[in-house]
Image (spheres, coloured by chain):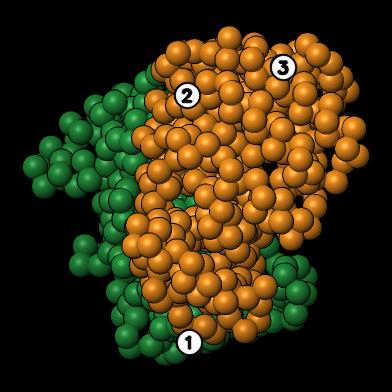
Chain colours: A green, B orange
């Protein structure tokens, strides 16, 4: 899922998003709650009508941003009490409020409010986070809008026993999907994949498996092999705005002098609007160096299409029963 | 013509530009000469290949920017000697260099190097500017690339006798089109239209008439009535980036609170990507206030389509022999 923080995937229209093959996006409850306000989006008929994106829309719970972006955040059993980073207003994001706001936003999938404990936090902190997350899980489900799917978020940091315990607790609840939170928040990738290999294969096969905030193309290829269905990550669009294009063999830094006279498109085999449109690396380099918005848009279209093709290819390999060979080939190609 | 300063109309792809009905754009010699360099564009096969825009491309001569943007500019009979605003490099933009650079850029129409005397400059300054422009006109034509059309630029400020004298001098030269420069550079609109009414109808009817740097929708309706064929102006795209949308009855300032819950598109009768795509005023307002790039793109698409429809309607009215009624109706609608 591309990330559409403020009800827009940066630099792209709804038609652009669909052109990359993305069938779902994630939008941010915290940002939209503060601006333009959930009541504005609800008045417009919800995020689909508002943003014109016709695919699926997941909203996160807002907890992560209330913790990382807001000021003077106090975490208690009630929820996150914080000051808006926009106007300083004091607000409480409780499990019930997170569900109310997401229902007003009208997403297809609401995420439970959780407490994120990073992979390298002390065990006691990780434990406290997951216990509170379980209590909040029940409160979220009690407050759910029956029109929305709701996913639980499994915490537990890099501690496999805690992950498995939390998985068991949340799997007992009537969630429509199970997400793995607290990964890719600073721990080495190998730590994440080691934990994932011991946890993800045990997830309830009847429910959707969502690995939050991940990741690089390598991360996706490996995690899909462990049974993950759904990802979200700002990397394709953020890297685009920083002038990085994903290609089969890694990444291309468009401002490099070697592209100054390069007539080639980013990737001859790519059918994104930038490559199919014939925009050369030399032109993209010029746009990027000149600070032109079109560089962000074309590179975002390309990177999201790269991710879109990667997961389409992965799906085809799974259906063909050849995922292992596919993963082996792609990981070798991508390098480290 | 939309303005594509750095070989891109800000926020729009080549396909976007065409979707507005624009069949020509103007790009800036000064900017492209300095960055990425004319040799880069030439190596790519010229501006059409570089930018992927398949319509007509005019390049200006670079003189205006050498005067207004560059540092330590010295004007002499040789040309404009100046320091690049990017790297401080000392450069000479002579009539011959202006033609050489524009030939390398590969535009369809090259503009002669001229000396712009604003409408309110003292008569002696206006006179000196037009005399030098005539001398440079001959030098430009001597240095022309036979593959390019070349337009002369008539100066003379707001002094009708000087305008007519200069028109006569330049009309005697084998230019493919005649432009009127030095308008819309600070003088009141009424002053421009008064001068235009006495000058434009006398332009050689066998050549294209181009009014440079103009203007508002009102300006276009009035100037077309005086026989002007071609315009360029940053207004539709610059105003878009400042949150202004053109509508039949004037301008809509999208950040205004009254659009907070407005479900309507900018203009129900408009077929631009923003209006046909169903993006509401409330959503555009949100995007604009949130600083999202998509606001710039959607408003630019709308405003250029507004201008595109205006000139398409004007053309139809001319062909139908009803331009006077058309102009009367549109000017009344647009207000002052």
Q: CA distance from mark 3 to mark 1?
A: 65 Å
| Chain of the residue on which disc 1 is drawn | A
What residue lies at 86% left-to-right and 19% top-to-bottom?
A: B74
Quick one: quadrant of the C terminus of chain A?
Answer: top left
Where disc 1 sits, the SS reads helix
A60 or A32, nearer to the observer:
A32
Q: Give residue A48's quadrant in the image.
A: bottom left
Q: Residues within 10 Å of mark 3 (few under 14, many from 20)?
A: some
| Chain of the residue on which disc 3 is drawn | B
Quick one: quadrant of the N terminus of chain A?
Answer: bottom left
Q: Which residue is mark 2?
A: B149
Q: Going by the image, does B104 lie left or right of A144? A: right
Q: Position of residue B279 (x, y in %)?
A: 43, 70
What residue lies at 31% left-to-right and 80% top-to-bottom?
A: A174
Comparing labels 1 and 2, the label whose residue is closer to the camera: 2
Q: Position of residue B212 (x, y in %)?
A: 62, 42
Where disc 3 sits, the SS reads helix
Q: CA distance from mark 1 to mark 2?
A: 54 Å
What residue lies at 76% left-to-right and 33% top-to-bottom?
A: B116
Q: Which residue is mark 1?
A: A43
Q: CA distance from mark 2 to mark 3?
A: 19 Å
Comparing labels 3 and 1, the label whose residue is closer to the camera: 3
Q: Position of residue B151 (x, y in %)?
A: 55, 28
Where disc 2 sits, the SS reads strand
What residue lies at 64% left-to-right and 30% top-to-bottom?
A: B168
Residue B57 vs B119, above or below: the answer is above
Q: Are marks 2 and 3 on the same chain?
A: yes
Q: Is residue B133 at all visible to an observer of this figure?
A: yes
Q: Give residue B88's quadrant in the image.
A: top right
Q: Which residue is mark 3?
A: B135
Q: Are marks 3 and 1 on the same chain?
A: no
């Amino acid at each position: 899922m591309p990330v559409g923080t403020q009800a827009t995937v940066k630099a792209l229209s709804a038609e652009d998003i669909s052109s990359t093959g993305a069938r779902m996006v994630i939008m941010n409850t915290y940002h939209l709650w503060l601006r333009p306000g959930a009541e504005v989006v609800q008045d417009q008929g919800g995020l689909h009508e508002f943003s014109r994106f016709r695919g699926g829309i997941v909203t996160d719970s807002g907890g992560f941003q209330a913790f990382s972006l807001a000021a003077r955040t106090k975490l208690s059993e009630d929820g996150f009490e914080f000051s808006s980073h926009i106007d300083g207003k004091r607000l409480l994001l409780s499990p019930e409020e997170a569900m109310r706001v997401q229902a007003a936003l009208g997403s297809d999938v609401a995420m439970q409010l959780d407490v994120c404990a990073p992979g390298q936090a002390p065990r006691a902190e990780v434990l406290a986070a997951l216990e509170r997350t379980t209590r909040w899980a029940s409160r979220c489900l009690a407050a759910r809008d029956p029109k929305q799917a709701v996913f639980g978020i499994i915490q537990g940091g890099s501690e496999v026993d805690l992950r498995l315990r939390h998985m068991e607790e949340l799997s007992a609840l009537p969630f429509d999907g199970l997400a793995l939170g607290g990964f890719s928040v600073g721990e080495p990738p190998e730590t994440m994949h080691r934990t994932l290999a011991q946890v993800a294969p045990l997830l309830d096969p009847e429910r959707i498996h969502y690995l939050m905030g991940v990741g690089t193309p390598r991360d996706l290829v490996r995690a899909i092999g462990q049974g993950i269905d759904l990802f979200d990550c700002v990397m394709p669009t953020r890297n685009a705005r920083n002038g990085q294009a994903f290609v089969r063999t890694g990444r291309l830094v468009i401002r490099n002098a070697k592209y100054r006279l390069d007539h080639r498109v980013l990737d001859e085999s790519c059918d994104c609007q930038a490559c199919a449109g014939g925009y050369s690396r030399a032109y993209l380099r010029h746009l990027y160096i000149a600070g032109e918005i079109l560089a962000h848009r074309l590179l975002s279209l390309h990177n999201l299409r790269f991710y879109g093709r990667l997961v389409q290819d992965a799906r085809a390999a799974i259906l063909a029963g050849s995922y292992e060979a596919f993963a082996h080939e792609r990981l070798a190609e991508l390098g480290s």
